[in-house]
Amino acid sequence: MKLALQRTRLKFRNQRKIMKNVYQLLTSSLLALSVISCGGGDLDVPPKAVLTESQVTNAENIDGLVIAAYSYLGNDHYTAPMFLWPTGNLRAGDAHKGGNGPSDIFAYHALSMFAPLVPDMESFPPDLIDLNNKKWTRNYTGISRANAGLQVIANADASSIPDAAAKQAELRFIRSIFYFDLKIHHKHIPWIDETMTQEQILATTNRDLTDQQLWDKIADDFRFASQNLPDVQQEVGRASALSAKAYLAKTLLYQAYEQNDVHEVVSIDQEKLNEVVSLVNDIEASGVYALLEDFGNNFQAEYDNNQESVFAIQRSLNDGSPDGRGSWPTALNAPQAGGFGCCGFHVPTENFVNAFKTDNNGLPLFTTFNDAVYNMNSDQVDPRLDHTVAMEGKPFKYDASLIHGGDSWARAPGIYGNFTSMKELEHPECDCRGENGPFTIWSMNTVLVRYADVLLWKAEALIQLDRYDEALPIINRLRTRAANSTDMLNDASIYNIKPYSSFATKQEAFTALRWERRLELGLEGHRFFDLVRWGVAKETLDTYFAIERGRKAYLDDAAFTKGKHEYLPIPNQQVNLSGGIYVQNPGY
């Protein structure tokens, strides 16, 4: 605990320093953009203040540009989040939208239903805001910040920036986090980098590069970062060679599942899978990362920047900014009661909860898990359930005096039920809690890559390489950790989880791997993108809807169309702004 608190204090000291630098140097960043983008005679009114290029291109101000790019990762919001609960969980059958019914942010309702999704989401009442376009715009703004810094470095005197390659590496790392996000949401996107003129940018389309070529571009950025950064950074929150290797492994794993024009997986690239294994081996051999002893500690603010956190958005409160850099992506997700405030979104489904049930051997009920809803008085479960989902009659965040109140904690229990997604929330009395009006935010980090996830990438690659015996101990390592993560929970007698003795076939191993990802990473925003990568989104969601419609009537008209709904549409506003040269995704 002492070590965890020391890490938390270190995090906040670093955050205050970084935020101070951001506010001092953000003006430099914005003016650098004008140095890069604006030619003489383009503006009728001269600027009131100008930094010359020589003033911008010194080591301190270039680091300010890097910090400004980092800051944009955490400058997100529930309308355009980096924590992908709306697009990763609502579309996967793991969570209902929640809130006060379908019209309460209708765009998120559409994500759960699929059928209403259209390129122009401004047509969705009552919000009349295109959240799909908002996310697209936000990602490209982050890319623009990174490109601005890269172009300044490219134009600078090399002697004035002794660590130029490292700064370029950080900027390319951040840039491709935004590109990765765009890629998994839209598939076909325009690639804009620091080498392009304004004319070239305006002529760029979202089909200039193939699906695989876009993945290559993203991989190139992460590869460059892995080759030009130290394994460990002195400042908390900065990218390292190891976090870049992790993102490179993730990119190659996604790229390995090659898709045709209607998003079917047509081949799996063995060479890329082998590189995934090699990269994860390097990460393991470094000794920098490890699994926490207790699974639940990953989701408590006092353990921010722990040894399982490979890369995280650094959140903070009371840092000198107007509202703090807290967890605005989760501001809707706290319960309506229990001292939280608002707003009851992100409600786990019965299907998701049922997936944690186990048989007498401590193994998942692969085929029968969803035959009946979970009965907490009689069903045996994987203990990760009670670290992930808060439910009626059980303690919230390990506090026996704070019992989940069921329907009284939910805004529309008759529509969505009354479960609460708990990983992204903290105790209402935590010092990490902040308020803005009715909204609750936290200074708890948003972990984008967790070491457990990295290990599962390796296990997945090994299985697809027919080396599933080597994947067995990786999966069992997580299951053993889960079995030992009951000290903070209420009733250890209901938990029964055991390792697998062996995998008889590749398919058996792959089924176990897919199940393990759902339980280990549940409600962390990965699930839908896993289903698309594996090419099983249609069959998985059809099976989910067949049962869940009988439990939640609002899903009666839900329908997933294969070859369409694997990706979101290119926002209509972007197609219009491109002058019609952007090509819409199939089916929209």
Image: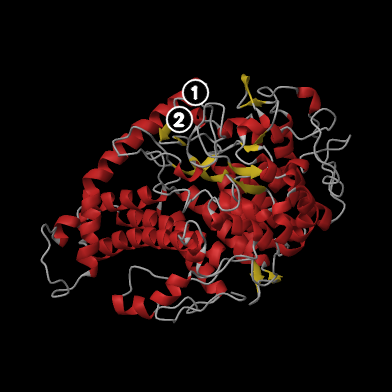
Residue at horizontal 71%, vertical 28%?
Answer: 484
* Closer to us: 340 or 562: 340
Counting from the top left corner in percent of width and height, residue 313 is at 45, 44
Q: Is residue 121 left or right of residue 541?
A: left
* Amino acid beneath label 2: Arg
Residue at horizontal 56%, vertical 53%?
Answer: 103
Q: Are marks 2 and 1 in contact (CB under 8 Å)?
A: yes
In the image, residue 380 above or below residue 180 = above
- Residue that numbered label 2 is attached to: 433
- Residue that numbered label 1 is attached to: 429
Q: Is residue 441 left or right of residue 252?
A: left
In the image, residue 20 above or below residue 158 = above
- Residue most toward the top? 401
In the image, residue 480 above or below residue 89 = above
Q: Residues within 10 Å of mark 2 (few under 14, many from 20)?
A: many
Counting from the top left corner in percent of width and height, residue 223 is at 48, 60
Assign the C terminus to one quadrant of the image. bottom right
The colour mode here is: secondary structure
Q: Is residue 297 left or right of residue 446?
A: right
* Amino acid beneath label 1: Glu
The answer to which quarter of the image holds residue 178 is bottom left
In the image, residue 369 above or below residue 215 = above
Counting from the top left corner in percent of width and height, residue 144 is at 34, 62
Residue at horizontal 48%, vertical 48%?
Answer: 78
Counting from the top left corner in percent of width and height, residue 357 is at 80, 38
